[in-house]
Image: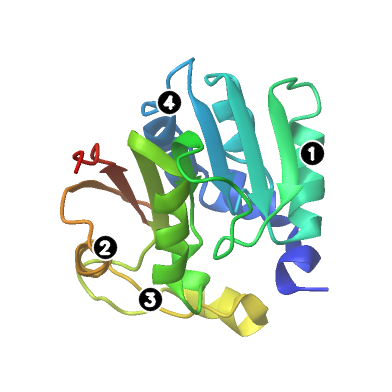
Amino acid sequence: MTFWDRVAGVYDLFADVYNGKVNRALCETVLSEIRDTDIVLECACGTGMISKRAAAKCAKLIATDFSEGMLKQTRRKCRACSNVEVRYADITKLDFEDESFDVVIAANVIHLLDEPCEALKELDRVCRSQGRLIIPTYVNDEKSGRTSGFAKTVDQAGADFKRQFTFASYRDFLVRAGYADLETVLIRGRVPCAVAVIRKQKEEDG
């Protein structure tokens, strides 16, 4: 059983209470990029914080995670949503065809990955030309750049953060990964979140 399986039942205390203000703004930012005709993939859906809200705006949503505990919570929240499929997936090895989705969301996971650039390649691969990649990630305070008390606590508990971004260093990371044309928004709060929106350009013929 992973750390995320163990905390799945209580994770919403963080998402809805401790960091509720940030997460509500995060959801609104993500939802503003979704149209009612969109086919959406969500990776690292967690307990379904975004999933249920996104389902109400899109044509179809496939919500995925690598934690069965988290998926159980998402299934419970989305059980009344007929346009939602919840399934296991490895974000670095997605079992979907190229250009399958209008919108691809991966929230608050990049800082946890050993190979984040491999995940970005997969997210890009399954996103259609002129689609949107939405990649929010919790970040540290911009002024100090120090690891937050919250991050230290959950990391010691077993979350195993691989990197600690600030808003500026997260944007720099994405630019170095090849995504210079992106929009980034900082949502301030107890655990701030940087929301990156990448509009995938249509590939030129020949």
Which residue is denoted by mark 1 in the rendering?
75
At label 2, the amino acid type is Leu
Which residue is denoted by mark 4 in the rendering?
34
Foreground disc of the pair 2, 3: 2
Residue nearest the viewer, comparing 158 with 128 = 128
Q: Position of residue 158 (x, y in %)?
A: 66, 80
Instruction: Tell me if residue 183 comes above or below residue 4 in the rendering.
Output: above
Residue 103 makes an appearance in the image: yes
> Mark 2 vs mark 3: which is more N-terminal?
3
Residue nearest the viewer, comparing 99 with 47 = 99
The answer for how far apart the CA atoms under marks 2 and 4 are is: 22 Å
Q: Secondary structure at mark 4?
A: loop
At label 1, the amino acid type is Arg
Which residue is denoted by mark 3 in the rendering?
164
Q: Residue at x 59, y 49 (%)?
A: 15
Which residue is denoted by mark 2 in the rendering?
174
User: Splitting the image into 4 quarters, where does residue 77 fall?
Assistant: top right
> Mark 1 vs mark 3: which is more N-terminal?
1
> Mark 1 vs mark 4: which is more N-terminal?
4
Residue 21 makes an appearance in the image: no
At label 3, the amino acid type is Gln
The answer for how far apart the CA atoms under marks 2 and 1 are is: 31 Å
Foreground disc of the pair 2, 1: 2
- In the picture as drawn, the residue positioned furthest to the front comes out as 206
Residue nearest the viewer, comparing 2 with 59 = 59
The C terminus sits in image quarter: top left
Q: Residue at x 49, y 51 (%)?
A: 106
> Mark 2 vs mark 1: which is more N-terminal?
1
- In the picture as drawn, the residue positioned furthest to the bottom comes out as 156
The answer for how far apart the CA atoms under marks 1 and 4 are is: 21 Å
Q: Secondary structure at mark 2?
A: helix
Residue nearest the viewer, comparing 109 with 123 = 123
